[in-house]
Image: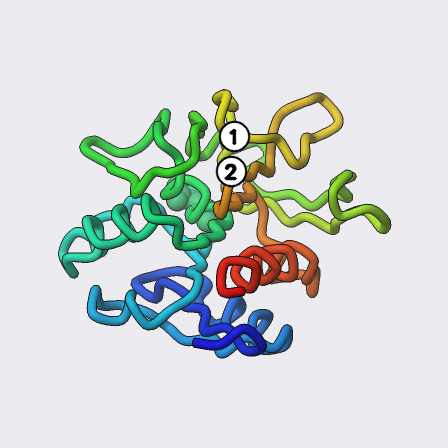
Amino acid sequence: MGGDRPRVGVLALQGDVREHLHVLGALGADAVPVRRPEELPAIDGLVLPGGESSVIDKLARAFGMQRPLRSAIATGLPVYGTCAGLILLADEIVDGIAGQQTFGGLDVVVRRNAFGSQAESFETHLEVPTLGDPPVHAVFIRAPLVERVGPDAETLATLPDGRVVAVAQGNLLGTSFHPEVTGEKRFHERFLDIVRARLN
Ligand code: GLN
């Protein structure tokens, strides 16, 4: 641990783990893949990658990660979820597979695969007021949408039609899209600010 070079895990059960490790490393974090509960106490923050949320959920339960992660989130571990990771951070999901569970923490309702087959994947430039200019080059891949933002959570970005695609709450951050695949580093930077603030 240490304020200058925080140790940030990427949950490495399935999904685009490598891309996140790369961005976090480039931003000065000691970025490490995390698979087992014993590894949680040694990290200062955790990224939940994109991938398939139902698979990550099942593997997390099989590896005994669900409970320890839930309590780490409840006690303030900073966590950033992208796409499937956002689904896993939602307190409630719509259109999960039968029995699908989440870690929770974000006071939001998230709809899985919300864009349907017509627009399964697309890219756009998103205005994100807290990040300023330039707009974020956002890649959506079978992406979820935030259908309801509860009173404890805050909207960070919407599509031009008002649908919510980025949220924050305390030490938690979630985006429907994948900044890690386009070289967009500002969400990870913001996340590392949260991680460092908690260490100091
Ligand atoms: N559709 C995936 C899910 O349900 C998310 C896709 C992604 O992470 N790119 O988890």
Q: How far across and how far down the image is residue 136, in percent?
A: 75, 49
Say which residue label 2 marks.
169
Among all residues in the image, which is located at the extreme right? Answer: 133
Q: How far across and how far down the image is residue 24, in percent?
A: 56, 70
Q: How far across and how far down the image is residue 127, in percent?
A: 78, 39
Which residue is painted at 65% across and 43% down in the image? 122
Which residue is painted at 45% across and 34% down in the image? 113
Q: Within 10 Å of the Cα at label 2, are there few (<14), some (14-19), or many (20+) other Cα atoms? A: some
Provide the secondary structure element on which disc 2 rests: strand
Quarter containing the C terminus: bottom right
Provide the secondary structure element on which disc 1 rests: loop
Q: Count the numbered circles shown.
A: 2
Which residue is painted at 41% across and 76% down in the image? 32
Q: Is residue 105 left or right of residue 146?
A: left
Q: How is the image coloured?
A: rainbow
Q: Is residue 182 left or right of residue 46?
A: right
Q: Amino acid at mark 2?
A: Gln
Say which residue label 1 marks.
153
In the rendered structure, which disc, 2 or 1, sits on the residue that comes first in sequence? 1
> Is there a contact, CB below 8 Å, between mark 2 and mark 1?
yes
- Residue 135, compared with residue 63, is above or below; it is above
Residue 161: quarter of image: top right
Q: In terms of depth relative to the viewer, which is nearer, 146 or 14?
A: 146
Q: Amino acid at mark 1?
A: Ala
Q: In terms of depth relative to the viewer, which is nearer, 41 or 198?
A: 198
Q: In terms of depth relative to the viewer, which is nearer, 39 or 53?
A: 39
Quarter containing the N terminus: bottom left
Quadrant for ligand 1 reads top left
Q: Is residue 12 left or right of residue 107?
A: left
